[in-house]
Amino acid sequence: MAEVLVVVEAAPGAAESGPTVKKVTFEMLTLARGLGEPAAVVLGAPGTAAAVADRLAEYGAQKVYVAESEDVDRHLVAPKAEVLAALVRQVSPAAVLLAGSQEGKEIAGRVAVKLDNGVLADVSALEADGTATQVIFAGSTIVKSKVTKGIPLATVKPNSVAPQPAPGSPEQVPVDVNLSEVARKVKVLERVAEQKGSRPELTEASTVVAGGRGVGSAENFKVIEEFADLLGAAVGASRAATDSGFYPHQFQIGQTGKTVSPQLYFACGISGAIQHRAGMQTSKTIVAINKDDEAPIFELADFGVVGDLFKVLPQAAEEIRKRK
Amino acid sequence: MKIVVLVKQVPDSGEERTLRSDDKTVDREASTKRMNEMDEHAIEEALKLAETNSGEVTLLTMAPGDATDTIRKALSMGAHKAVHVTDEALHGSCAVQTSRVLAAALGKLEWDLVLCGAEATDGRVQAMPHMLSERLGVGALTGARKVTVENGTVTVERQTDEGYEVVQAETPAIVSVWDTINEPRYPSFKLIMAAKKKPVDTYGLADLEISAEEVGLANATSQVLEFAPKPPRQAGVKITDEGDGGVKLVEFLASEKFV
Ligand SMILES: Cc1cc2nc3c(=O)[nH]c(=O)nc-3n(C[C@H](O)[C@H](O)[C@H](O)COP(=O)(O)OP(=O)(O)OC[C@H]3O[C@@H](n4cnc5c(N)ncnc54)[C@H](O)[C@@H]3O)c2cc1C
Ligand SMILES: Nc1ncnc2c1ncn2[C@@H]1O[C@H](COP(=O)(O)O)[C@@H](O)[C@H]1O
């Protein structure tokens, strides 16, 4: 069976433990099993593979290609694309999957040009014959598409596939890193983590409590945070809320923010514009709290409360505490 | 400093959008046509950089012939001139082909910096600046929420999931921006009038020495096979808070085993 290359998406992680694998990688490894033999590709600083190999084995990687170098880590994207394109030429995989993240899409684009190969963005499914499913236009249209030049090269939309473990013991295969001058044009001088704290990662949380313009101020976001903490949830925000400075931008949900697909989503003081829905409408259960009976968010809410969020949320919190 | 800003015409992302039933390309007549919102931020940033570095801003777009309105609107923000790449043969081109055409057009222009949006709201491919970087051999600094240019060095704060990265390259370079970078200006009446007279050069494929066999739907590197509207979510229960909305909400959560 031909190999399917899965480019590992990792988060920096703590200094002691090193990088951690993002959930979308497990989703891609699960998807890859239907297409061929999943082979993970680690592109990063020395030590990355050692930190992530166990997790990749757990999710069915049959092989782990390891391309590690300081040069890969210290330059933006281009070195990763160069190494990946060389690997594709070398092993002729059945398909190449990358995360549907900023970096994944950028690497995919560069590889597409290098190999003169088509590229599909944000696929939610991929069949063995190369037919991909994409949900486009803010979730309104389902498309079946195909790469017609070259091999299936796709970025996979996070939260589209349920990750399933398939433990194995992959061999690690070192990959040479020979970079051109051009690949080293953009230097990464610094990486700054702004968020963190104790809440779960927004895109991976099983419950998300989001606030919009209706929350009214940065100060008032405490109401959202307290409710989230009671449920062990992540906190999100609409663009109106981040633009108004109520909440930091990296927590924005929607077309130009993050896409979330939790089991349970709370939209509090959010009207439900198309661009906001684009980032949350695949949530399993949606709860909306809004003063305006006509707010479009109610069209997709499984449970809607027409009311003031500053009354409804504290009362709900009290009731939950009572029941605990 | 010479700056080129890439501007894409897209169907308004706040409206219903669809594909054409005949050839399954984006239906550009079904929704209001407008400039990709993110590109307005690229123009704004270009104008700011031009103001402090006595620069000149040229807009570059590849779009059907009827994009002139969008181009005039974009010019009314204050850019100096525009280049419109248009050719019947371009219809249905994929991202890889579009990058081939834009790279050829950029090859005919003089620039220190190319600015563009981080993504277009129609395809959301997010790859154009890196595709161009690959073709032109210059660095791409993408996803900027802040850009500074000093003595031929571009420094960018690149927005990431975790926070940001500081990335740097020499000019010439390509920079893409998110909408967090600035607040685009509203064109003044004077600028709107002036925009009507600004030069717009039109390039066809022949001007770029690209053959029709390299572009267009028939030669695209990916293709839409079929499409269908996604059934909308069904609304569930809606109650009005009469003093017990919070309790009722928790009853719902309990019935679904969330609490
Ligand atoms: C290119 C583009 C990209 C975009 N990307 C995104 C994106 O990624 N994410 C995003 O969210 N938006 C995005 N938008 C913006 C989007 O169109 C909306 O403007 C935005 O989602 C509105 O946010 P909101 O619902 O918080 O604010 P509003 O639409 O102002 O709604 C506030 C709601 O709060 C309710 N409310 C007020 N007070 C209370 C109270 N005390 N209790 C209960 N309810 C109350 C009101 O009834 C109202 O419905 C984008 C727009 C464009 C053009
Ligand atoms: N046809 C086009 N003409 C001009 N600029 C474009 C075109 N397509 C993409 N771009 C630019 O590339 C950016 C990213 O687009 P995309 O890679 O399609 O998401 C857009 O915001 C535009 O600035």
Image (cartoon, coloured by chain):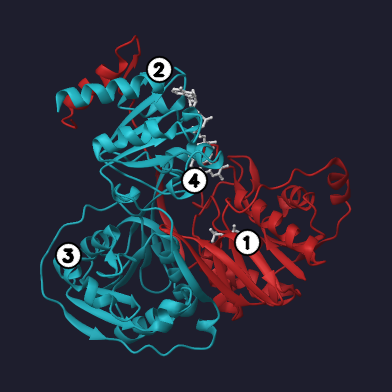
Chain colours: A cyan, B red
Check the image and report above or below for B9 versus B81: above
- Element under disc 4: loop
Establish whether ligand 2 lies closer than 8 Å to the Cβ of label 1: yes
In this rendering, does residue A304 appear at all?
no
Circles 1 and 2 in contact, beta carbons < 8 Å: no
**Labels 3, 4: one chain:** no
**Residue for badge 3:** A59
Three-letter amino acid code at the position of disc 4 = Ser
Measure how far apart labels 3 and 4 are at the Cα level: 40 Å
Three-letter amino acid code at the position of disc 2 = Gly
Instruction: Name the mark nearer the viewer: 1 or 4.
Output: 1
Residue at 54% x, 84% y: name it: A182
Q: Chain of mark 1?
A: B
Residue at 72% x, 66% y: name it: B4
The image quadrant of residue B12 is: top right
Q: Chain of mark 3?
A: A
Instruction: Name the mark nearer the viewer: 2 or 4.
Output: 2
**Labels 2, 4: one chain:** no
Q: Nearer the viewer, residue A119 or B38?
A: B38
**In the rendering, at what x and y percent does residue A224 appear?**
37, 33
Indicate which disc residue B116 carries. 1
**In the rendering, at what x and y percent does residue B221 appear?**
47, 68
Instruction: Name the mark nearer the viewer: 3 or 4.
Output: 3
Q: Chain of mark 2?
A: A
**Residue for badge 4:** B21
Measure how far apart labels 1 and 4 are at the Cα level: 30 Å
Location of the N terminus of chain A (image quadrant):
bottom left
Residue at 31% x, 32% y: name it: A227
Measure how far apart labels 3 and 2 are at the Cα level: 45 Å
Indicate which disc residue A307 carries. 2
For marks 3 and 2, the one nearer the N-term is 3
- Element under disc 2: loop
